[in-house]
Image: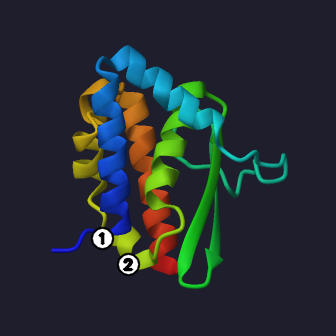
Amino acid sequence: MTSSPIDTELDELADEFELLGDWEERYRHIIDLGRGLAPMSDAERSEENRVRGCASQVWLVTDAEGERLRFRGDSDAHIVRGLVAVVLRLLSDRSPADITAFDAKAGFARLGLEGALSTQRSNGLASMIERIRRDAAAA
């Protein structure tokens, strides 16, 4: 069975998290990933791009590039910005079919995020995934 590009990226993220050990180090890594996000303009931080269902402010922009979707995102909270970076690392620059086929719940459980995030952050993460899946289904 061949793995999808998302599965390959998930394997790499899981390996990174495994090396870090405890969740304090993993949170720092997530925050560092968020610092690497490309900046968004003030115009892109619009109500239209805001992800509903997140306690923090989260914005996502979807661009179709050929048969792939590229996502850009940002948040006003450090850990959430890092979670945006994790989501984008997995799902950006992928085909709509790969995005909609990805089992996000199982993927994030594999990373250990399921038990490490507050209910609000888990709900926000689910809202981000739902928005990306909706954009992929519409593409």
For disc 1, the marked residue is 101
- 35 in relation to 125, above or below: above
Whole-Å distance between the Cαs marked 2 and 1?
6 Å
Q: Which of 134 and 33 is in front in this view?
A: 33
Q: Three-letter amino acid code at disc 1? A: Ala
Residue at the far left: name it.
Answer: 1
- Which image quadrant: the N terminus? bottom left
Figure quadrant of residue 104: bottom left
x and y, in percent, of residue 74 in the image: 65, 43
Residue at 53% x, 43% y is: 84
Q: Is residue 123 above or below residue 100?
A: above
Residue 133's x, y, as percent? 43, 65
The residue indicated by pointer 2 is 97
Residue 39 image offset from top left, x and y in percent: 76, 45
Cβ–Cβ under 8 Å for marks 2 and 1: yes
> In what element is the residue under mark 1?
helix
Amino acid at the residue labelled 2: Ala
Whole-percent x, y for residue 136 in the image: 48, 73
At horizontal 36% and vertical 36% (from top left) the residue drawn is: 16
Disc 2 secondary structure class: helix
Residue 109 in which image quadrant: top left
> Which residue is found at the position 54% from the left and 67% from the top?
93
Q: Please tell me how crowded label 2 is: few (under 14), some (14-19), or many (20+) other residues with Cα within 10 Å.
A: some
Q: Residues within 10 Å of mark 1 (few under 14, many from 20)?
A: few
